[in-house]
Image (cartoon, rainbow, N blue to C red):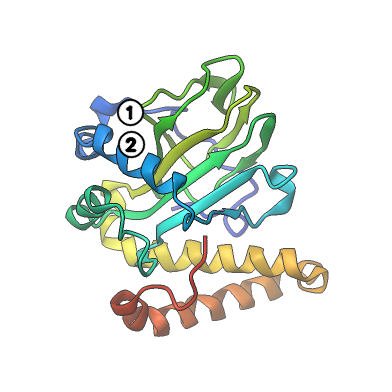
Amino acid sequence: MWFAYFSSDSYQDEPNFFSEEELSWSSQITSKAVLIKSEVEKMVKTSSFTSKTYFIEGLAENNGWKTFSFKTWGIEVKGAFNNAPVLHAIIKNNPNIVSVSINTLNPGIEIKPHYGDSNTFYRTHLGIKIPEGLPKCGFKVNKESQPWEENKLLTFVDGNFHTAWNHSNTERIIVVFDVIKDEFQSKRRYICFRVRSFLILQLLFEKSKRINNLPKWMHRIFAFNLFCLLVVLYPYQKLFGTIKKHN
């Protein structure tokens, strides 16, 4: 298992993309793709829909990359599935789908190239509203570019170096699923705690330069304590959802 920041500087030991035929769980999503698309399109048009700018500010400019979380690393966001029963049923039937979110990218916005959090899961994008194909709108893993397509999946391993862009005149919308690999099923809860503790640590980096500038061994102590706190809070959050609604 590889985890960002604490394992090595980068991870490049996976194919760039995976076809739907290679992944046994993909049909669970694609068979309901049209219904999911309908649910999401209705949600984003309502006045109650509120997405949030991705918390690492340096990855995209002008608040152009936003997310709305349904489930985050094994914990559902309370009330988020109220208007998405089809999507919720899929999640309930596959415990390896540990995170789900709506992800929007504004016109003219690029997400800077970066390594993801771990090699222990697939990240797959279901196209909801795709304004154009390549070269104006697309996704790149290492040196290979692919377009999104509506009602189809674009799947990669998050640990690989990747970037996205939307140079069209229209917003791009996808649903993002994080799916634990089969070989790591027995470590699913550990992976969720580990990744989520690092995400919280990155949030602390964004909020405080003092914490960011501390030596790495102290970051490890922070991450370990966050991991332990998440373990303690897990039974409550599993029953009642996230303590604080977040994206």
Q: Nearer the viewer, residue 209 or 93?
A: 93
Does residue 170 sit above or below 72 in this rendering? above
**Residue underneath mark 2:** 37
Q: Distance between the residues labelled 2 and 1?
A: 7 Å
Q: Earlier in the sequence, mark 2 or mark 1?
A: 2
Q: Which of the 4 image quadrants contains residue 106?
A: top right
Q: Residues within 10 Å of mark 1 (few under 14, many from 20)?
A: many
Disc 2 and disc 1 in contact, CB within 8 angstroms: yes
Residue drawn at x 22%, y 48% as measured from the top left: 86
Q: Where is residue 14 in the image (x, y as percent from the top left)?
A: 45, 33
Q: Position of residue 25 (x, y in %)?
A: 22, 40
Q: Position of residue 108 (x, y in %)?
A: 69, 29
Task: Assign a secondary structure to mark 1.
Answer: loop
Q: Which amino acid does label 1 sit on?
A: Asn
Q: What residue type is labelled 2?
A: Lys
Q: Position of residue 224 (x, y in %)?
A: 55, 76
Asked whether, in this view, residue 214 is left or right of residue 244, the answer is: right
